[in-house]
Image (cartoon, rainbow, N blue to C red):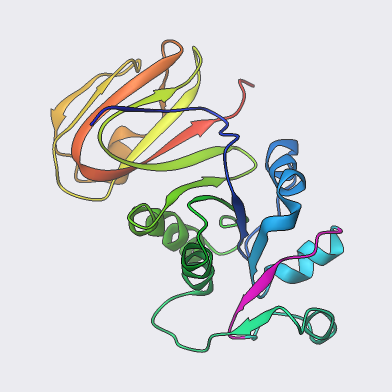
Amino acid sequence: MNEKIPFMRTDFDAVVVANGVFPRDGLPLSVLSHLRDDLFCCDGAANRLMRAGFIPKAVIGDGDSILPQVRSMLSDRFIKLSEQENNDLTKTVHHCVLRGYKRLCILGATGNREDHTLGNISLLADYMDLAEVEMWTDNGTITPAVGNVEFESYGGQQVSIFCFEPKPLTVHGLRWKIENRILTRWWQASLNEAEGDSFKIETSGKVVVFRQYHLF
């Protein structure tokens, strides 16, 4: 099935905030402001959300990262989940999906420890089976995809594609061509560049696609 994924989506119905680097760029912060009544966060992210003037609808986690005073202020919406099979970001995404949210923007999932960043990005390949998800950072958007998918872009936009399954990948509309290749390392489809206002991927395996916000 063909689909076209816009650049800078405006149809999210909830925001999930993880305990990485809190958004500093105006674009992620604009999503927070627009959906301030539908914010959900991992427990440690509640500290920064409250400091920035946002009150989450629910705080999910095992309680090991939230400040005592913040936990006290949010005691009516703190949901303690101590199981360790899933991280707090996954617990929060599941909480949203179970409550009917279907289009999630994930913020604060990168930065700080590199193992957390890599783990959180890889989880997009799982979350896409549950809902429409996209991760926004201060640099760009990260979108999971599979199949024949068209992405909105702009000429010169920096684009990277990371494959999570050993399936052939074909890309149209990027400066450096990829045709029916099985990529075995993450760097092999990174640091590419859009030639126009869209590009297309074709693959039966799950990938995540990074698109930079601006030209610098």
**Residue sitting at x 56%, y 34%:** 9
Q: Is residue 24 left or right of residue 216?
A: right
Against 184, residue 94 (above or below) is below
Residue 87 point in image, percent of width and height: 47, 74
Against 142, residue 107 (above or below) is below
Quadrant of the snapshot with the C terminus: top right
Residue 3 point in image, percent of width and height: 33, 28
Residue closer to the observer: 79 or 137: 79
In which quadrant of the rendered view does residue 152 lie?
A: top left
Q: Is residue 215 magenta?
A: no
**The magenta stretch spans which residues?**
53-62
Q: Is residue 107 left or right of residue 201?
A: right
Q: Main secondary structure of the magenta part?
A: loop
Residue 111 point in image, percent of width and height: 60, 56
**Residue sitting at x 74%, y 43%:** 34
Residue 27 point in image, percent of width and height: 69, 36
Residue closer to the observer: 111 or 1: 1
Q: Is residue 43 left or right of residue 88?
A: right
**Residue sitting at x 50%, y 58%:** 117
Against 143, residue 20 (above or below) is below
Q: Is residue 202 left or right of residue 73?
A: left
Quadrant of the snapshot with the N terminus: top left
**Residue sitting at x 74%, y 56%:** 37
Residue closer to the observer: 177 or 97: 97
